[in-house]
Amino acid sequence: MDPNIHYLFNPHSVAVIGASDREDTVGHSAIRNMLYGRLHGSYRVEGYPEKVYAVNVREQALEIPTYKSILDIPGEGIDLAIIAIPAKYIPKVIDECGQKKVKAAIVISAGFSEIGEDGKSLEEEMVRRARNYGIRILGPNCLGAMNVFKRLNATFTDEMVMLGPLSFVSQSGALCTAAIHYAKEKKIGFSHFVSVGDKADIDDADLLEYLDRDPNTKCIAIYLESLKDGRKFFETALRVNKTTPIVVIKSGRTEAGAKAAASHTGSIAGSDTAYDAAFEQAGIYRVATLEGLFDCARALGYQPIPKGDRVAILTNSGGPGVLAADHAMNIGMHLAELSEDTLKKLNDYLPAAWSHSNPIDILGDATAVRYTEVIDILQQAPEVDSIIIILTPLSFTHPYNVSQQIVQIAKHSPKPILANYLGIISAVSGRYLDEHGVPEIAWTERTVRAMHALSTRSNFLRFEAQAEIPPTQIDVLEKKDRIYTIIEKARQDGRHILTLLESRDILKTLGIPLTSGVLLEKKEAIDSAGIGFPVAMKIVSKQITHKTDAGGVRINIFSAEEAKKAYDEIITNVKNYDPGAEIEGIWMEEMISGTELIIGTTNDPTFGKMIMFGLGGIYVEILKDVVFRLVPIHLKNAEAMYDKLKTKAILEGARGMPKVDRKKLEEMLVNVSEFVHKFPVKEMDINPLVVTRKGLKAIDARIILE
Amino acid sequence: MDPNIHYLFNPHSVAVIGASDREDTVGHSAIRNMLYGRLHGSYRVEGYPEKVYAVNVREQALEIPTYKSILDIPGEGIDLAIIAIPAKYIPKVIDECGQKKVKAAIVISAGFSEIGEDGKSLEEEMVRRARNYGIRILGPNCLGAMNVFKRLNATFTDEMVMLGPLSFVSQSGALCTAAIHYAKEKKIGFSHFVSVGDKADIDDADLLEYLDRDPNTKCIAIYLESLKDGRKFFETALRVNKTTPIVVIKSGRTEAGAKAAASHTGSIAGSDTAYDAAFEQAGIYRVATLEGLFDCARALGYQPIPKGDRVAILTNSGGPGVLAADHAMNIGMHLAELSEDTLKKLNDYLPAAWSHSNPIDILGDATAVRYTEVIDILQQAPEVDSIIIILTPLSFTHPYNVSQQIVQIAKHSPKPILANYLGIISAVSGRYLDEHGVPEIAWTERTVRAMHALSTRSNFLRFEAQAEIPPTQIDVLEKKDRIYTIIEKARQDGRHILTLLESRDILKTLGIPLTSGVLLEKKEAIDSAGIGFPVAMKIVSKQITHKTDAGGVRINIFSAEEAKKAYDEIITNVKNYDPGAEIEGIWMEEMISGTELIIGTTNDPTFGKMIMFGLGGIYVEILKDVVFRLVPIHLKNAEAMYDKLKTKAILEGARGMPKVDRKKLEEMLVNVSEFVHKFPVKEMDINPLVVTRKGLKAIDARIILE
């Protein structure tokens, strides 16, 4: 990590450039927050930052001496510059900052790339100059940043957030403001609060890297509209997520684009689908709503990770319990199935009318003591991974007493506990939970979703621990050489597209079985070909890259006689299509039938090389039932791809269809991924790959070089 | 409607049976609410109900005279009895109520069907006795009911809700309590508030009927766990919904069942799928969350119905606007495409940096005046059906001013307006909106969903206005007679399942084309059959109801020679299978290919006869892509069924597949529906119905009589 990013959040000396004593200016708020903001109420940390300077070319800023230029400030250097002056002056000011050895700058000012081409040039100029000096820039067009544990409020908002384990990174300044208010209400505490603005220099990935090393950050919540370098984000997030969980809400007009997108590989990716794949692969929990972002971040930041997804729902009223169970099942969690032992303990303790199953309805007259006893029993139950506590304010249930008990238990609980208190009468008691690190979420569905974030993380960690790339055949030196030889030959010919035979050769090195076939160099070879009918016949020529268009393909040929006729027709067609084409021969191969799969790869503009897998034909074109991952994938990724396929039952012998060798298929996915990852391949499609009763067989492949 | 239900909510005289002066009893709360509850604060309505009596066999209740029995009360009769005594005494008390001419009773007490068989008998006894006297019972095991406009609080909760246009019916008492608190916080007003308990007598349908006639109820919100008589509910809801919108949240463990359900018609229905179909067909808006229930009910109760689903999103910050747009697209709404005219007006008025499209971002420095001007422009824009106003608290935007302007505009707005204010700093201003009938919903996704409830209702009303049953062929007397003749004949034979030829005859009367075929009474008839090969051959015998099991089916027969061989084989197989079977002959028919559809009907335990439609094979078995409706359906229902099919692109010529005659298919659905509706048919399946290039053709049908 660039150490200068550290100075952004931990400066010893700060200069506010554009500091002002006019109350309605951003420069006023910024200097005020530096000088006094840190003295407000409980946020007082004396003497930090050690030195704060005001810079303004024309004005005085409050009571401290104001310098006309940062260069006029006495002493050695300045760690952080907060810049709130008109955009056009900023490149020059950056130069001055560079001379003053500034390490990081927050550019609050707008007027850069968001206003069009001129602004874009100005932004590039600013960044270029900053890079000359190694200055890292947050923004432009941002609210600024807070390091809450240091009470550093380097923003122009006059409210500070509470101390706590979350960090928030937002591409929208307005949402930062809204989040500050919400966090205050819900007693959500933060370590860092960052408005990234236009991300001209410092981007989400840089911040992930920094926040991962921040000992106070237990969960990172991100509001994202777009990524410039998706690959960098993905790789950083995948690494960071192993120690610090990440939750994201991603909005973006691209979704409309995704819907309109046509059905082939290239256009499905590059869209929201690609973001979805990247988030899932990196173990980032994606939510669709702002409230969900904070619910899940609170759960991940404050509660332990469960062993699995078997949730126990404890309630004092039936209705909300059933709703919670519905939500849990809808989202794909499991309701813990209570063991004989647990049931016995509950039967011994509870009144006879309790629900006798999960959701555990401990009845409308439940007291705090009854809640506590049952939570204790659930803590001991090995079949329960996590506990949701629902409380409806009824006569005998005193929410505050229940909250106090829950807090005591949660302190030492290895299982996550989330609470869902209904009715505002419970608001004070809910807040008590919030203040003591047990997220209370006012709506049942949201509580369940937050628990799902926890169990999803538990899966991810287990999953990554098992990640491995199998020893693929292409790593064997001899095979590698063979691949390079094929690629080299095509390049020497000036070709980007490999021929059928070259592609078949490569598939073989990847361990992907193919249909049997033979290259006929003359028609007479048909008689001795030794391939049973029916057969298909395809032209082989370096010049003919679209065989069907050239009339170079015939299928369903049932006899040698038909084959000879087809041979002549293909030759005639191809010669008509391209008189200059060099014909190597005609490929004759067995016809096979079965369920058709596609394995494809593409180059996403945001995330780079991706691999796609799904059923062919209508499944990909109409049902869009395909799964994407960023290349390279490991075997667990391939398993996840397979499991994500909605139509996977088709591959598992439904309706008497041939059953796929799943393990073999997953290995093929990893091998294709390794191939496009390690070799100069732009795109590759195996279409179709057929599931037959004798195993998987590829019929055709198309490989395009970079 | 039974007039006694009217007395439940509008009694002149009330007796509280089990009234008590012990503060921790339900009987105390009930009599207190009757005597004093109505005097609380702004809820005071003097002299209503005119007479309140306390009944307790042992105790005094507060300061009013207490009678040992309702029979001891002087005067003619009592309209309403509120009963809060142990369950076992209630049947006797019901008799006394009957003698006292009580019209309705609220049985608060628990201890009935929820405790098992004994309780169930007690409940049946109670209802039996009540029916003797025409007494209508709400409950048992309920919280009671409120008629808020009359300040009648016939519950044991001590809080009254605000006056307003919603009515709430809940199967969970606990959720009633939670809802009262939430409503208070959000300034949601109600006309009626009803806890239905076990629904031993009065059920949701009765209440819908009553509430539809209540001039104060503008929207009915229901929390539902189960229905006893789904058909009654459906028919009532469909009728009521045309004047009073209904929103429902339905929970229930059946969902787990639905997931485990196998893939055939019978087991998909009877589950949550059947509820879903019934709600959709009745125009009931179903939500998944409690907050959604009140969001949507508020929108429907307080705002006008839009002309369509083209929403304009007005915002002062980009992020939330984009999120709203994402949600709107996800939920299937359309973003209004701003016309040249509207764009010109906006360009003329707004700063150059506005978003120039919908979402309409009027920038962070937007004032209340700017909001107002833009809303005015959108009011005039014919391409905009509804308006969502998003407000982020930023320096120049004063939420309270914006709220005041919105309220002024909303008073006369023909287009619905919903607001989404971010951040608690706007809470007071949001509440101002709530109080003035413009629902302010704190979270973007929920705001969009509430608007979706409005546009869905707009669709439903338009849709029902166009509903018609086409003049079907089976209504022609001659065809009707023919159907009855076939059914009668089968009945005389003691058969419930029609033969292939009988079923084909019925399909013909329903206007459903069939494959061409001929009944071979002897093998030699094959030569003169006049059907081109390939053909299929099937046994025709009244005794053989499972033709394939009996070895009575052969397909893919390519010549007369093969056909003769198949003929002999079938005869031999069938004779082995059932030596007593009378063989009418062998049906020989053309083989056709194309996309296979299924039309089926089933008898759902909750909703009765339902019709199902979808693609056959893996589509129904693995993708579960089938659509259900309650019988009878009209043509618009059939259209909706078709449109709901996820795989409908397959029927519309995708990948060169034959295109279906949609209109013809929809007519067939209506005809099948009419057939099972009007005739004593238990189940019917047309499987497959094949889409060929020459039109739809049924290959096989199975009709089971009642």
Image (cartoon, coloured by chain):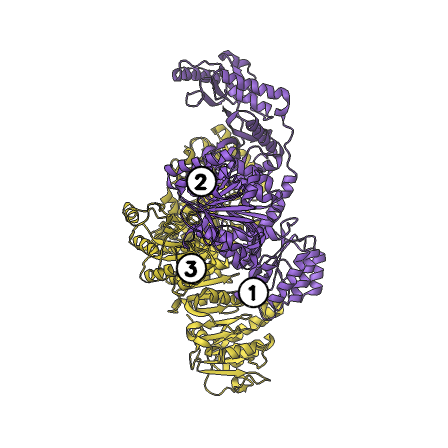
Chain colours: A purple, B yellow
According to the picture, the residue beneath numbered tag 1 turns out to be A428
Q: Is residue A458 above or below residue A566?
A: below
Q: How far apart in space, not on screen, are marks 1 and 3 (Cα)?
A: 23 Å
Mark sitting on residue A274: none
Q: How far apart in space, not on screen, are marks 2 and 1 (Cα)?
A: 50 Å
Which chain does tag 1 point to?
A
- Disc 1 secondary structure class: helix
Q: How far apart in space, not on screen, are marks 2 and 3 (Cα)?
A: 45 Å
Q: Is residue A631 visible?
A: yes
Kind of residue sitting beneath label 3: Glu
Residue B435 in percent (x, y) is at: 40, 65
Kind of residue sitting beneath label 2: Val
Which chain does tag 3 point to?
B
According to the picture, the residue beneath numbered tag 2 turns out to be A93
* Viewer-side residue, B692 vs B475: B692
* Viewer-side residue, A398 vs A437: A437
B48 left or right of B139 in image: left
* Viewer-side residue, A250 vs A189: A189
Q: Is residue A693 above or below residue A84?
A: above
Q: Is residue B226 above or below residue A95?
A: below
